[in-house]
């Protein structure tokens, strides 16, 4: 269930219920959900007078969130962030684009990690990834390297992070801008790791508790 949070004069759908709207009690407790709601605001919409300025656009950050939702196989998050992307693209009068299909390819690419392949396989992967990322760059600038860096952070993959960082430094030569971009990416990763874990496992926990006569 989602709550409604007023930020910057607009209303933003949030992922976690507030107490007045909750149909059933939160497993983690409402104070914890309130923290997640605040974290969501700092990651996507911004909390007036509190959040650091964003460097990446809201669409950039939603693209990263959707990629992580696919990576973590969270259906709820895919639906939520997919709707956000469609809304933002409509607001910006974006050209038609089968972006979902590109995300599937990106995530499949990024499931490969250096320790699981040979040196020659890895070099072949890097060459293929760079060609693929370059093609996407002409469709949506920096699209692939943002997501690659996010997945690298998500799984603490230093090799992937170094590869993506090399691209980020070319696209963002100014140090302050680069720091802001990485900060934006890192926030999305931290939020999505918490959100996908909660959304994927809450139904399991509820089923287990229900089996013991505990309804929540």
Image (cartoon, rainbow, N blue to C red):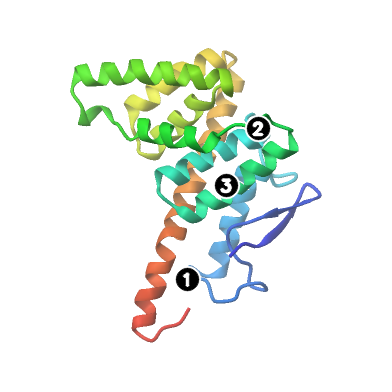
Q: Which residue is mark 2?
A: 57
Residue sitting at x 45%, y 82%: 215
Q: Earlier in the sequence, mark 3 or mark 1?
A: 1
Residue 22 x/y as whole percent: 61, 73
Query: 50 or 69: which is nearer to us?
Result: 69
Query: 116 or 135: which is nearer to us?
Result: 135
Viewed as shown, does residue 119 lie left or right of 61?
A: left
Q: Secondary structure at mark 2?
A: loop
Q: Earlier in the sequence, mark 2 or mark 1?
A: 1
Q: In the rendered structure, are the residues bearing label 3 and label 1 in contact, judged by CB atoms less than 8 Å apart?
A: no
Q: Secondary structure at mark 3?
A: helix
Query: 171 or 142: which is nearer to us?
Result: 142
Residue 15 x/y as whole percent: 58, 58
Front: mark 3 or 1? 3
Task: Please tell me in which quadrant of the rendered image residue 93 appears.
Answer: top right
Q: In the rendered structure, are the residues bearing label 2 and label 1 in contact, judged by CB atoms less than 8 Å apart?
A: no
| Above/below status of 29 relative to 148 | below
Q: Which residue is mark 3?
A: 81
How crowded pointer 2 is (Cα within 10 Å; few <14, some 14-19, many 20+) is rated as few
Q: Which residue is mark 1?
A: 27
Disc 3 to disc 1, C-alpha distance: 23 Å
| Screen quadrant of the N terminus | bottom right
């Amino acid at each position: 269930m989602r709550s409604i949070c007023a930020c910057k004069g607009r209303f933003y759908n949030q992922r976690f219920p507030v107490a007045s709207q909750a149909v059933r009690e939160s497993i983690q407790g409402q104070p914890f959900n309130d923290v997640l709601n605040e974290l969501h605001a700092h990651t996507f919409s911004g909390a007036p007078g509190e959040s650091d300025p964003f460097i990446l656009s809201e669409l950039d950050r939603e693209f990263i969130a959707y990629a992580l939702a696919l990576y973590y196989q969270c259906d709820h998050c895919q639906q939520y962030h997919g709707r956000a992307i469609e809304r933002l693209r409509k607001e910006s009068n974006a050209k038609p684009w089968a972006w979902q299909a590109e995300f599937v390819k990106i995530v499949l690419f990024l499931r490969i990690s250096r320790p699981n392949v040979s040196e020659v396989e890895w070099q072949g992967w890097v060459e293929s990834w760079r060609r693929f990322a370059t093609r996407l760059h002409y469709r949506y600038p920096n699209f692939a390297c943002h997501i690659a860096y996010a997945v690298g952070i998500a799984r603490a993959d230093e090799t992937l992070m170094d590869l993506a960082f090399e691209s980020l430094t070319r696209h963002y030569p100014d140090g302050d801008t680069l720091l802001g971009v990485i900060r934006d990416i890192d926030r999305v990763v931290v939020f999505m790791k918490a959100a996908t874990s909660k959304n994927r496992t809450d139904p399991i926990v509820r089923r287990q508790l229900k089996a013991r006569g505990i309804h929540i």
